[in-house]
Amino acid sequence: MSQTIGLTKHSYTRVWHHISASKPHPTLSTQPNVTPPSLGRLASRIATILMGKHKPTWDPSTDCGDYVVVTNCAALHVTGRKMWQKTYYRHNTKPGSLQSVTMDVLMSKFGGAEVLRKAVSGMLPKNRLRDKRLARMKAFEGDAHPYQKNIIHFGGVKVGQDGWQEAVKAIREADMKKL
């Protein structure tokens, strides 16, 4: 029997989640199954997963979040005129060194992954765990990524794809028959 009081290292298991930035999402999209989720909704959901707030073992002082793989960042969906009006600033603390760049220039230089990373970074708490949490977000411009084997599968179907809930039900029913 363990003498440790509270949650131990073994209770914080990390899971890999896959989110497509260009595919319509049933709960994140403003028009479900029509438009892809907007940048802000997508970033807030990713920040929640990175922090681990979706887990019952969540604690604000521990790093208990999961990994997130985001694909198709080149096709980020923003509403209104944000693509041309949203401005990102940086400063190196020297007088007169404030530099600004708009979202469309940032996307053309560094891609949509950098825009998404900045949005998620702004939604994470500003503490010592921020860089570790942000490092668990893997963003890619296209569909291809090297983390295919890490994403959760049920019955050969990735979680989040069409038919994954039916695969889970089939596995559960098969297990109940064994009992």
Image (spheres, rainbow, N blue to C red):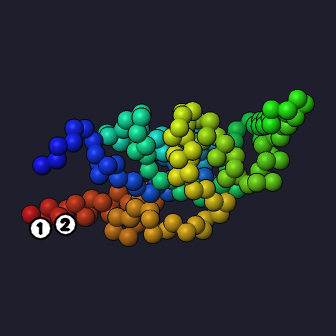
Specify the farthest residue to the right: 96
Q: How far across and down, in percent of the image, does residue 79 sit?
A: 70, 38
- Identify the disc placed on residue 161: none
Above or below residue 164? Residue 47 is: above
Q: Can you name the residue that lies furthest to the top here?
A: 95
* Amino acid of disc 2: Ala
- Asked whether the viewer can see residue 146, the reply is yes
Residue type, numbered disc 1: Lys
Residue underneath mark 2 = 174
Q: Mark 1 points at which residue?
A: 178
Rendered image quadrant of residue 153: bottom left
Number of marks:
2
Compared to 42, does 71 lie above or below? below
Other residues around mark 1 within 10 Å, as few (<14) / some (14–19) / many (≥20): few
Q: Report x, y in % for residue 26.
A: 49, 46
What residue is rendered at 29% in x and 52% in y? 10
Residue 71 pos. (x, y %)? 60, 58
The answer to the question of whether label 1 and label 2 lie on touching residues, with beta carbons closer than 8 A, is yes
Q: Is residue 5 left or right of residue 164?
A: left
